Image (tube, helix red, strand yellow):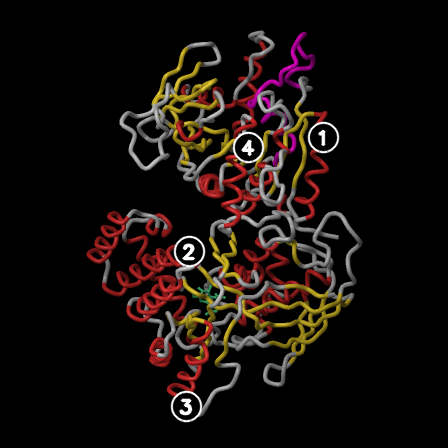
Amino acid sequence: MKHMASADRPERPTLVILAAGRSTRFGRAKQLEPVGPGGASLLEYAVYDAVRAGFGRFVLVVRESQRDEFEARLRPMRAAGVSLSLACQRLVHPDLVPLAPPGRVRPWGTGFAVLAAATALPRQGPFAVCNADDFYGRVAHERLGHALADPPSGVRAFAVTSPLANTLSAFGGVSRGLCEERPDGTLLRMTEGLDLRLDGDAPRTGEGAEAPAARPRVVGRTPSGAAIRVDGDSQACMGLWGFFPDILPLLEERFRDFVAASPGTEDEFYLSETVGDLAAAERTRCGLVPAGQGWMGVTFPGDRERVAVSLRQLTEAGAYPVDLWTPHVHAKPVGSAQPSLFGPPPAPPSGVATAPGRINLIGEHIDYNGLPVLPMALDRHVNVDFEAVAHSTVELEGDSVHGSFAFRLDRATESAPRGHWSNYVRAAARGLLDHGVELRRGIRGTVTGTVPVAEGLSSSSALVVASALALLHANEAQVEALELAALLARAERYVGLQGGGMDQAASLCGREGHALRIDFGPLRVTPVPVPEGWRWVVASSLTRAEKAGAVRELYNERRAQCAEALERVGRTSWLEVVEADEDEFASILAGARKSLPLTLSRRFRHVASEGRRVIEAERALRGDNMAAFGRLMNESHASLRDDFGVSTQALDEIVGVARDAGAAGARLTGAGFGGCAVALCRANEAKGVIEALIDRFYAPRGGVDRRALFVADASNGATVTP
Ligand code: NG1
């Protein structure tokens, strides 16, 4: 079985988790302590967050004696498709310390733990390091992932930081890396602070409604015993780091120096001090990445309760599932009935691959600009009913309109005439082959579907996804869901539309009852529950938006205009525009209005404002504020109509009728230029909205059927049923 493991792709970073500490102050192995509502430990939360942030594999550094216990705890993660390995940290190391010094029991410290992991790291590509007993939160992992993917020139290391006062324990002194910054924002030096605690009873920053009268001070000592007294809002590194492999020889060199200096049996080789020294000596430049979210750690038994309460709250708010490792969208391998490295042998290579279409709730024409979007998978599907064939031919039969076709997999790069539906199947095959999946078997079968074609509901991506799953299954191969979504998004562009990556991800990662927040670069999918009592009415404008026809040029033109507008205002990332604070955002928009020609400035305003609407819409959804969600949909439609120029008179009319009939909001969905609109209604008002649309929009045009007007439910993603 050929499995395109993410491990083969060096660009996805590895996370090294340091779990060999002795937990002396905690009293038992705190790395495995269950703290989440479903019994997960903090290291499992780190893995979960890092997978969502695009990390491809994990190395756990443990003590020899803990190996079996850890192996057992890793099983559910591995079964969920996470690539994990163990590295043992010993007192001896074949190259660095062939003999342990007499009397030494204490591990060598965090800097050495990274060297112990080195043999398990890919030779190329960045890696991160974190502590097993700290909770960093999703944002911290994401920011580090972005920083590693796109480091500022010359920066070869990153330290994730938080204000020191926010990282203390109420139950005793803790150790942290204390950062001093250069004027350019990189690390000047770092000192390991031990036994850090608030000075006296000064209040903590960030807690209590009243601003503290005096800034809190933190006291402690350095490893050599010197007193430390610093501002509580100075930056502390909590053990989350990002590196490139060129750090390893530097660490090795410093560790040899450390050992050569005959350290005491309790002295440690700290990662923080070593990177701090390397930065101070200008041997490496280390960027500082703000963690951006409440860091939590478990140093003392009393810390556990506070962390458990916060994790329960985060889980209730939908940020985490109760059980992290029952198959989830983020790491679920698809394409085979066997998602795990364990379990029964693969199912026979025939079955039905089913992939849903999607409606986009908000966030239009921004996925290809790298901005988050909020679609949901539809309860309408494309089905490929297939059996594997020994020769490498794909032979599929469609309905009477679409007809049949056959092609050889070794000729998947050849296209059928423009507009022919086989091009989407060829694109899927080509995408898999380009990714290195070995397709020795072809498939024979039929394609049926209930996703209306050319209506902005992603029938094309559903076909691409279902074909890819059928081919994977026939060849008993697997590709992890997000990786598959990303490669199929690239593959679908072979057909000529320079599309984004929303549709393939929504089709693969849909979740019943949930909208999907989809982030790009790297691709991540976060299900967001849709509050009870609300329905989505989908209504066709009765005009097809043929992406293989005229719409293709209009779409590609928009994409090019967006890139040009961004470049001409001197920015390199839309995310940076969208995340600006209110004042800066207003001034960016004003600048764009002044400096860009009218059309480009309108395109710019649409992308920037739509990006912000998606963030607000996610907040509204999570806060059950559907009136606000509806308003944002209305604003989105106006922006697509006036600034982006992709609405039509029929779409505007549908949106107007739906709103008049009581919808909380309505907008065109998908690329526009025809296709469908979506209206958000209270469940008890959906019928009235549908009736109004029939009376005022469809009746004068000769009526409507269930393909053109329906209530959509958020559905699960693509599957293969053997
Ligand atoms: P539709 O309208 O479903 O073809 C297209 C793109 C999306 C996205 C939307 C506009 C493809 C396959 N689909 O969707 O990525 O850009 O337009 O938001 O390219």
Residue 121 position, x and y percent, is: 62, 34
User: Mark 2 CB in 8 Å range of ligand 1?
Assistant: no
Residue 250 position, x and y percent, is: 52, 22
> Which tag is nearer the camera, tag 1 or tag 2?
2
Query: SS at mark 4?
Result: helix
Tag 1 and tag 2, C-beta contact below 8 Å: no
Tag 2 and tag 3, C-beta contact below 8 Å: no
In which quadrant of the rendered view does residue 654 lie?
bottom left
Q: Which mark is residue 304?
A: 4
Q: Residues within 10 Å of mark 2 (few under 14, many from 20)?
A: few
Q: Residues within 10 Å of mark 3 (few under 14, many from 20)?
A: few
Query: SS at mark 1?
Result: helix
- Inspect the image, locate mark 3, and give the three-letter code of the amino acid beneath it: Arg
Q: Relative to 701, does residue 224 appear above or below in the rendering?
A: above
Residue 106 is inside the magenta segment: yes
Q: Which residues are magenta?
A: 95-122
Q: Which residue is mark 2?
A: 623
Distance CA(mark 2)–CA(mark 3)? 39 Å
Quadrant showing the C terminus: bottom right
Q: Which residue is mark 3?
A: 701
Q: Which mark is residue 615?
A: none
